[in-house]
């Protein structure tokens, strides 16, 4: 009975997360049909207007419609987060698979490097590269990815080390399959669960880091905007011009919360050993 | 035991060196020339090169790096700020104090809030309070720290003017008596500490809750119950001890994140810490201060990691003492 109860609760958080993200996705994908404005064109005559019929969420210092900027900002935030996460997951999975499979010195050196990378406050390096060299969206994606693959690599490595000794892998080896085939066709499908969970956690982290960089003025550069950039524009008077600073923050919060809920739900789903 | 620690310290050195070298290369290869700051359009290129010479920027990168490293290792001399002319080491040492105060109290706040709520939720598993805490913590885990800080400043500093929203102390701080100085500092710290600490508290909460649930369901707790050991003793003496252990190893991961978060909180609340010094130095291309900030930041993180490691080994003697061990 108890078990049944928790099962339905898990499904609940998964469903809630999916619902939230679907809503946000709909907003950023088809929201532009709802607005007659362009996200970049300025209209100083209407600067800093509070929400009204014509501007649902008011305007910023240059008279740009906040609602429209939120939609385009959301697209940029999501694109950066998804690409950075994909790159990080691919690197992390490859590193994890091969270190665990080959073992020995290769494993030792690579995992030591992972330790090194994990020990550093990432924002230091990101600050140096972007602050001194300038920012672009591609650079931002690569930097975020390069500082995020390590945790995935550790998780994959731990999983593969266990699976290496399972009968199905031994059987595959005995029947003479090549390393790549065993790793990608046999082991990977079996460890995909933890990889997906780590991808979900990674994307929440990346969204938060990207928006804080943009908030510092180091991420997405004006006139283009991610949600973090919009917050940067609203920081001068956070409550006076609440229509700039509150909706963008809520967007980030809700998106990250959605992913967190999905992550929690999936983890419970994939982890049959968890006691409940 | 001692030799293990010595070996750990030695193994940190290459890590540190890699980080510092990488930072040096990034800083010096980046576009932009610090000398331009002192020039106006009427001055000659000779002027520029003489300024570059004065800063030592005319040499090749390896020479500059060698010279810098030599001064740091043998004289602990990080050079002088290009702009203020102050010793970079002194600038960072002062900034480090603010960052340390901020991070320390944020960590304390996060530990207390995370652990106590985590235990509470675990004990009331699947009841209302558990759901409530769980959802609250997902909220705190998802909230962008800088936005939380922004909202706190807006509400408590601007709207209500209860608490100061910037700086670590009032202008008249040094004219206050010792007691008033403490309250002045505490008032300035409340909002930044909450901003930095809440997401961390949520991380601790999740760990404590799941660990505690797992421990409470384990056989030795069942055995203790069967033997008739009283409930509070089981909870405080048996279960809690084992649930708290992983927190120590979690600290190793949390501390770099704490420092990263501190950068944003310092910028937001205009606190004179390492993060803000770094951001300012990046924009003014103050290479010596930047390098000093990065170096001290790395050392701080590595030392905290080492400390967490040592604590863990002391508390949990089951850990193997093999040098190549990777968890």
Image: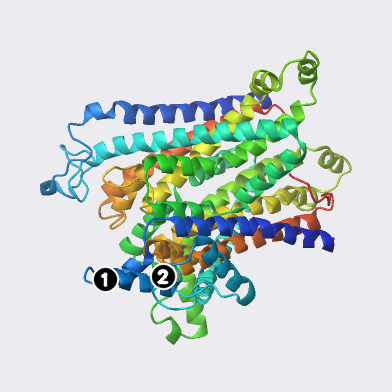
Q: Chain of mark 1?
A: B
Residue A5, position as x, y percentages in the image: 62, 26
Disc 1, SS: loop
At horizontal 44% and vertical 48% (from top left) the residue drawn is B144
Q: Are marks 1 and 2 in contact (CB under 8 Å)?
A: no
Question: In the rendered view, would you say B284 is above or below B250?
Answer: below
> Nearest the camera: A85 or B267?
A85
Q: Quadrant of residue B75?
A: bottom right
Estimate how packed mark 1 is, as few (under 14), some (14 to 19) or many (20 or more) residues with alpha carbons within 10 Å.
few
The structure's colour scheme is rainbow
Residue B36, position as x, y percentages in the image: 32, 66
Q: Chain of mark 2?
A: B
Q: Is residue B43 left or right of residue B299?
A: left
Q: Quadrant of residue B109?
A: bottom right
Question: In the rendered view, would you say A104 is above or below B64?
Answer: above
At horizontal 17% and vertical 48% (from top left) the residue drawn is A49
Disc 2, SS: loop
Q: Residue furthest left?
A: A45
Residue A41, position as x, y percentages in the image: 17, 40
Question: In the rendered view, would you say B217 is above or below B194?
Answer: above
Q: Is residue A148 left or right of residue A164?
A: left
**Viewer-nearest of discs 1 and 2:** 1
Q: Residue furthest front?
A: B46
Q: CA distance from mark 1 to mark 2?
A: 41 Å
Residue linked to disc 2: B167
Residue linked to disc 1: B44
User: Which one is earlier in the sequence, the residue at label 1 or at label 2?
Assistant: 1
At horizontal 41% and vertical 26% (from top left) the residue drawn is A22
């Amino acid at each position: 009975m108890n078990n049944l109860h928790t099962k339905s609760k898990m499904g609940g958080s998964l469903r809630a997360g999916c619902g939230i993200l679907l809503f946000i996705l709909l907003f950023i994908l088809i929201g532009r049909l709802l607005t007659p404005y362009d996200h970049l064109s300025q209209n100083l005559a209407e600067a800093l207007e509070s929400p009204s019929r014509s501007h649902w969420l008011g305007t910023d210092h240059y008279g740009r419609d906040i609602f429209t900027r939120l939609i385009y900002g959301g697209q940029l935030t999501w694109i950066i987060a998804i690409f950075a996460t994909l790159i990080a997951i691919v690197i992390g999975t490859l590193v994890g698979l091969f270190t665990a499979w080959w073992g020995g010195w290769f494993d030792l050196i690579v995992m030591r490097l992972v330790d090194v990378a994990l020990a550093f406050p990432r924002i230091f390096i990101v600050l140096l590269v972007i602050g001194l060299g300038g920012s672009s969206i591609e650079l931002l994606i690569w930097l975020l990815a390069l500082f995020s693959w390590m945790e995935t690599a550790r998780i994959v490595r731990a999983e593969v080390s266990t699976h290496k000794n399972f009968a199905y892998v031994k059987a595959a080896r005995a029947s003479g399959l090549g390393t790549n085939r065993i790793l990608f066709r046999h082991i990977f499908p079996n460890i995909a669960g933890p990889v997906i969970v780590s991808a979900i956690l990674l994307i929440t982290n990346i969204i938060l880091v990207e928006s804080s960089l943009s908030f510092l003025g180091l991420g997405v550069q004006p006139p283009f905007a991610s949600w973090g950039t919009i917050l940067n524009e609203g920081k001068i008077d956070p409550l006076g011009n609440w229509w700039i600073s509150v909706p963008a923050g809520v967007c980030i919060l809700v998106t990250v919360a959605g992913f967190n809920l999905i992550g929690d739900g999936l983890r419970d789903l994939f982890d049959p050993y968890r006691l409940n | 035991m001692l030799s293990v620690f010595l070996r750990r310290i030695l193994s940190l050195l290459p890590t540190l060196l890699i980080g510092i070298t990488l930072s040096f290369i990034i800083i010096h290869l980046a576009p932009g020339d610090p000398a331009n700051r002192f020039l106006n359009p009427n001055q000659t290129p000779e002027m520029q090169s003489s300024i570059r010479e004065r800063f030592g920027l005319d040499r090749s990168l390896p020479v500059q790096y060698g010279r810098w490293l030599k001064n740091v290792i043998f004289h602990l001399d990080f050079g002088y700020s290009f702009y203020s002319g102050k010793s970079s080491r002194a600038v960072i040492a002062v900034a480090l104090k603010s960052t340390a105060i901020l991070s320390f109290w944020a960590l304390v706040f996060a530990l207390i809030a995370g652990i106590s709520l985590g235990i509470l939720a675990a004990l009331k598993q699947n009841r209302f309070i558990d759901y409530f805490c769980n959802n609250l913590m997902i909220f705190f885990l998802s909230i962008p720290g800088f936005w939380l800080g922004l909202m706190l400043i807006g509400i408590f500093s601007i709207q209500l003017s209860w608490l100061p929203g910037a700086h670590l102390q009032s202008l008249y701080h040094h004219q206050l008596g010792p007691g008033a100085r403490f309250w002045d500092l505490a008032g300035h710290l409340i909002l930044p500490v909450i901003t930095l600490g809440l997401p961390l508290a949520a991380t601790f909460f999740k760990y404590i809750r799941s660990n505690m649930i797992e421990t409470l369901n384990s056989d030795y707790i069942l055995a203790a119950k069967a033997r008739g050991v009283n409930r509070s003793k089981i909870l405080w003496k048996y279960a809690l001890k084992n649930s708290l252990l992983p927190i120590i190893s979690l600290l190793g991961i949390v501390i770099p994140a704490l420092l990263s978060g501190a950068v944003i909180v310092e910028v937001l609340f205009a606190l004179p810490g390492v993060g803000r010094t770094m951001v300012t130095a990046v924009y003014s291309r103050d290479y010596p201060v930047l390098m000093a900030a990065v170096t001290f930041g790395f050392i701080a993180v590595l030392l905290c990691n080492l400390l967490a490691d040592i604590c863990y080994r002391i508390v949990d003697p089951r850990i193997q003492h093999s040098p190549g061990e990777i968890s």
